[in-house]
Amino acid sequence: MNILLTNDDGIDHSGIKSLFLELDKNHNVFVMAPDRNRSGFGSAITFLTETNAKKLEENIYSLDGTPVDCVKNALEYFCPFTPDIVVSGINPGPNLGPVLLYSGTVGAAFEGRNLKFPPIAVSVASFEISDYSFAASIVSQILKKINTIDLEPGSILNLNVPDHNKFKTPELKITKTYLEEQYQIEEIFLNDQKCIEEGFISLSPIKLETVSSKNFSSLSSLLDEF
């Protein structure tokens, strides 16, 4: 598989290094990541100034831009092959619920939403952890079955892994993500935050939908005022 790998914590972060070591075993990997920590940049892009890329090794580049800049530049100019998927991470600290709106890890994943396979944003629910190999192995397992996943176009997978020092053999759960916590509904699927709190691995399919029939209907009365 052809993989475009990025993150929001910077090219030197141990999370992306661990993920590269794992994915490079069985896949063709191109890396473009920010040259410094760009956490919290969401889906921001650079447009008032030019961005500059630096080749560090064969198929490994840094960019003085945002995580989304990295994906855009890699896809348009630098990656020597057509990626099948974008993998973003591994991020220290969870990306759950409303935090998704600010996450550069998730923002970068969404920029790859039109490739062959749904992008994967990867986070570990700990700020103290330094060994990301367990989370990287989970990504590798998911990639083995990615061709069996049929999500709606424009969707991504948001993977959050608990601290494996506390939860040695966590079970994978498919979860729901709520941007507004008060609207959570207890159903067969856990919400992502509760899943991590209980020590499970959370995998959420996410799609940003801008069209709502209810919203259009509720605004129709405005037409009578103009």
Image (cartoon, rainbow, N blue to C red):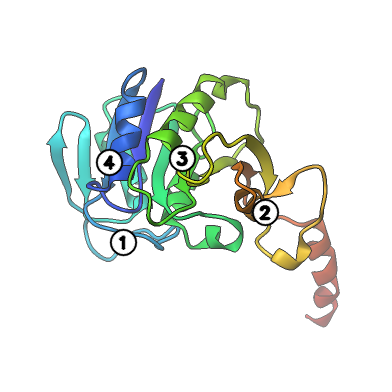
Near mark 4 (Cα within 10 A), the count class, few <14, some 14-19 or many ≥20, is many
Q: Amino acid at mark 2?
A: Lys
**Residue under numbered circle 2:** 194
Q: CA distance from mark 2 to mark 1?
A: 38 Å
Q: In the image, 107: left or right of 16? A: right
**Residue under numbered circle 4:** 32
SS state under label 4: strand
Residue 171: image x %, image y %? 62, 34
Q: Which mark is residue 112?
A: 3
Q: Residue furthest bottom?
A: 225
Q: Residue at x 46, y 47 (%)?
A: 123
Q: Amino acid at mark 3?
A: Gly
SS state under label 3: loop
Q: CA distance from mark 2 to mark 4?
A: 33 Å
In the rendered structure, which disc, 3 or 2, sits on the residue that comes first in sequence?
Answer: 3
Q: Amino acid at mark 4?
A: Met
Q: Residue furthest top?
A: 26
Q: Which mark is residue 47?
A: 1
In the rendered structure, which disc, 2 or 1, sits on the residue that comes first in sequence?
Answer: 1
